[in-house]
């Protein structure tokens, strides 16, 4: 049976890194959903863009905003920062995937009927270059490719303001018509 390591000798430690913190607050998503349900699609999009309607909690956590949406397209913007980094010091792939998914969701949501709600059922992201924390404000530009009554698809690109491509994605969505739901 192995013996426990002797911990009586002090081992050298790396100097402590500067501690950083970030506070995140959000609005109850059910309350926001109830408010949004009373609005037309156009009113909801305007309220989200203007800040009159609270951002979803995930948008507060990661830090992205809807800046444009309509007619089967949408643009989300993200301010990159070290709080989104993986251990390699670059923005984590999950952050990029989340912003791409949200942009495609909005694009599809503006392409289906007013009484239809969509849910992501598959997401494929292709990362083509590392996204540095210092990239600044980047955009996820999305467009609906197909908006059927049961299934919809979309594609998106994650770009900086100079047009450099960091990732591109496709997604499939399940569509439910709330007017015919039991």
Image (cartoon, grey):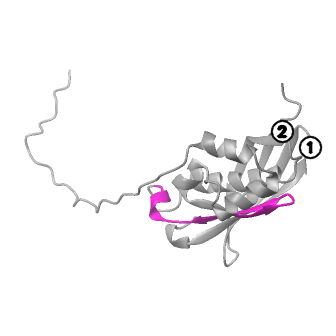
Residue 35 place in picture, x, y as percent: 68, 46
Q: How many marks?
A: 2
The magenta-colored residue range is 67-86
Residue 121 place in picture, x, y as percent: 75, 39
Residue 112 place in picture, x, y as percent: 88, 48
Q: Between residues 156 and 69, which one lies in front from this camera angle?
A: 69
Q: Residues within 10 Å of mark 2 (few under 14, many from 20)?
A: many
Q: Secondary structure at mark 2?
A: strand
In this rendering, would 89 be left or right of 57? Answer: left
Residue at point 67% right, 43% down? 33
Question: Which residue in the structure is indicated by mark 2?
Answer: 175
Q: Quadrant of residue 127?
A: bottom right
Residue 61 place in picture, x, y as percent: 52, 53
**Marks 2 and 1: CB-CB under 8 Å?**
yes
Mark 2 or mark 1, which has the lower sequence index? 1
Q: Residue placed farthest to the left in the image?
A: 8
Query: Which labelled disc corresponds to residue 148?
Result: 1
Residue at point 57% right, 49% down? 58
Q: Residues within 10 Å of mark 1 (few under 14, many from 20)?
A: some
């Amino acid at each position: 049976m192995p013996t426990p390591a002797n911990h009586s000798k002090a081992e050298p430690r790396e100097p402590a890194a500067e501690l950083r913190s970030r506070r995140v607050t959000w609005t109850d998503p059910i309350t926001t959903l109830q408010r949004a349900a009373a609005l037309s699609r156009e009113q909801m999009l305007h309220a989200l863009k203007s800040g009159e309607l609270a951002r979803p909690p995930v948008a507060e956590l990661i830090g992205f905003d809807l800046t444009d949406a309509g007619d089967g397209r949408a643009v989300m913007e993200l301010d990159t920062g070290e709080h989104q980094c993986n251990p390699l010091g670059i923005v984590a792939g999950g952050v990029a995937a989340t912003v791409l998914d949200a942009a495609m969701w909005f694009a599809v949501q503006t392409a289906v009927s007013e009484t239809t709600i969509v849910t992501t059922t598959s997401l494929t992201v292709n990362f083509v270059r590392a996204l540095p924390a210092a990239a600044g404000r980047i955009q996820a530009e999305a467009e609906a490719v197909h908006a059927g009554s049961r299934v919809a698809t979309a594609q998106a690109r994650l770009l900086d303001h100079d047009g450099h491509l960091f990732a591109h994605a496709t997604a499939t969505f399940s569509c439910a018509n709330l007017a015919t739901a039991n």
